[in-house]
Image (cartoon, rainbow, N blue to C red):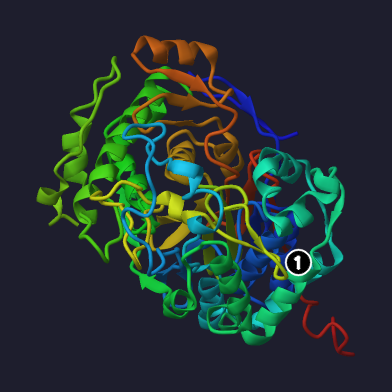
Amino acid sequence: MGSAWRDKAGSPFTTEKQAAVASRGMVAANHPLAAAAGLEMLALGGNAADAAVAAMFVLTVVEPMMVSLFGAGFTHMYDANTGNAVVFDNYTVAPGAATPTMYTPVSETWPDYLETVDQQNRIGYRAVAVPGALKGWCALEADYGRLGLETVLQPAIRYAKRGFPVSPYLVERIRQCQADLARFPASRARFLPDDAPPQPGHLLVCHDYAQTLQCIAQEGADALYTGALGDLVVRDIAAHGGILTRDDLQRYRVVRREAIRGQYRGHQIVTVGPPSAGGVHVIQILNILEHFDMADLGFGTAASLHVIAEALKIAFADRLEYLGDPGWKEVPVRGLTSKFYAVARRRQIKLEVAGDYEAGHPWSYRSTSGHTTHLTVADAAGNIVAMTQTIHEPFGCKVTVPGTGIVLNNTMYIFDPHPGQTNSIAPGKRMLSSMAPTMVYRGRRPILALGAPGGTRIFAAVLQAIVNVLDHGMTLQEAVEAPRIWTQGQALEVEPGIAASARYELMVRGHEVQVVPTVAGGMNGIYLDRTNGVLYGAACWRADGAPAGLSGGAARPGLWDPAYGR
């Protein structure tokens, strides 16, 4: 059992997991086999990029409900050689045949605003967008790795071929999606042996997927984007009414983007920008919270939770108006992340009553300076990778392509199915993400790197963890496990760990409080203690996450020299 944490004003909670401590490398991922794969690469002499790519490929095997090489994501890397932040945008894009009216919405209001007739944007082949995951991971390995693709793929091939024990968490996800998985033969065969979810501990083997990974080890990303593997996938999609084509795969490009930056209580916040809204809102909300004494308000109190909830509502009002693919519409990033804009928005918050907010006017400030996985890696040289990847909902569109083991995404569901909106569908357009792989710098170097899965709830979870560390003095393990809240303007979702007294006070302030099992998913991260060079890895109870660290080192030089010790 972990340590108990108490705040002077908030409710206590006890962490369920322990942090890992090491000196030469750390991998924190949402499955222990993925963390072990990353550690294997570090032990082989690889760096953080090698470890991250190896771990992510393993996650496609052991966490197939969350991530696939046919998925999407963002990679944020700190390059210790140059001191630069590097961002790979490998998010999905709409196929060339996509149109703003390709789905029929069922509602003009939340919570059913994104739903469409026959769930065509969620389940089945018409929900599939052009993938960027495999191309992005291969680009990271080629540009920054040392070991090469064939080496980093070996752990994933091993677990696909020999199998791995299914966790209760994966079993529960399969059970939740059982009816939809059963509609597609290859998904049914893989995840529903004997037409039922496997028992915990059952050895899950996927020979088809092992062969797919072996093909990628030999041919690289071209196997999917221009090769025979892609032909298999495209033929299956076309045979079942999907619109993704061979040309879509061939045209896909990974985009290198500039990181965006903010300041919070003397620390620099470095994160990803559009087409992810997540990083923008992390900085925007921290700018608002900086005007409140969060430490004095206390963790888990109605006062502090109210301020966070109001800032979240402000961010979502701006999100609906301004955030989207910057290749299609200019996004006022500098205005939304401006300290002066935060002052204007903070003045709208009333401390004793919940408010309603409309989009602000960030353009005048611009001159101032859903189911997913995450992993974080740091190596002995100081390189750090924070990587968030997704197929959106559990098991994506629920389709596994026969003969390949590849689970297809359903990221078309992230688009607004209503024409004429900022995030409406258009051919070749990137949909709006909420991912926020983020690093916190003290001086010129990062001291904290973290991220989480969880769809639109991602950035709320990330910013709360940052506040927990910087304002409430929590360890990283405490920060990632602490109870969370979330709202986008409707009900205020709170985890059970939020005290009943605080929930009541929030209702008195006018919030519609709804207790939910979790807000966002399994967060993990790494804290780098610059005073002694120690790395702390943490993963929370909301997923099968585990940190794994590498210490020790080579034998003392000259140990077997006859003159040694004289």
The answer to which image quadrant residue 151 occupies is bottom right
Q: Residue at x 74, y 54 (%)?
A: 32
How many marks are shown on the rendered structure?
Answer: 1
Residue 377, image x, y percentages: 59, 62
Q: Is residue 159 above or below residue 267?
A: below
Image position of 238 (left or right of 403): left
Residue 41, image x, y percentages: 70, 73
Image position of 58 (left or right of 498): right
Image position of 507 (left or right of 537): left
Q: Residue at x 59, y 57 (%)?
A: 375
Locate the N terminus by quadrant: top right
Q: Secondary structure at mark 1?
A: loop
Tell which residue pokes out farthest to the bottom in this image.
562
- Residue nearest the viewer, comparing 546 with 24: 546
- Residue nearest the viewer, comparing 435 with 36: 435
Q: Is residue 170 above or below residue 343?
A: below
Locate the C terminus by quadrant: bottom right
Image position of 546 (left or right of 114): right
- Type of the residue with mark 1: Gly
Q: Is residue 460 above or below residue 237?
A: above
Residue 371, image x, y percentages: 55, 48
The answer to which image quadrant residue 340 occupies is top left
- Residue nearest the viewer, comparing 93 with 546: 93
Q: Is residue 357 above or below residue 415?
A: above
Residue 17 visible within the image: yes
Residue 497, image x, y percentages: 58, 24
Q: Residue at x 74, y 72 (%)?
A: 43
Write down the residue under mark 1: 552
Q: Residues within 10 Å of mark 1 (few under 14, many from 20)?
A: few
Residue 435 visible within the image: no
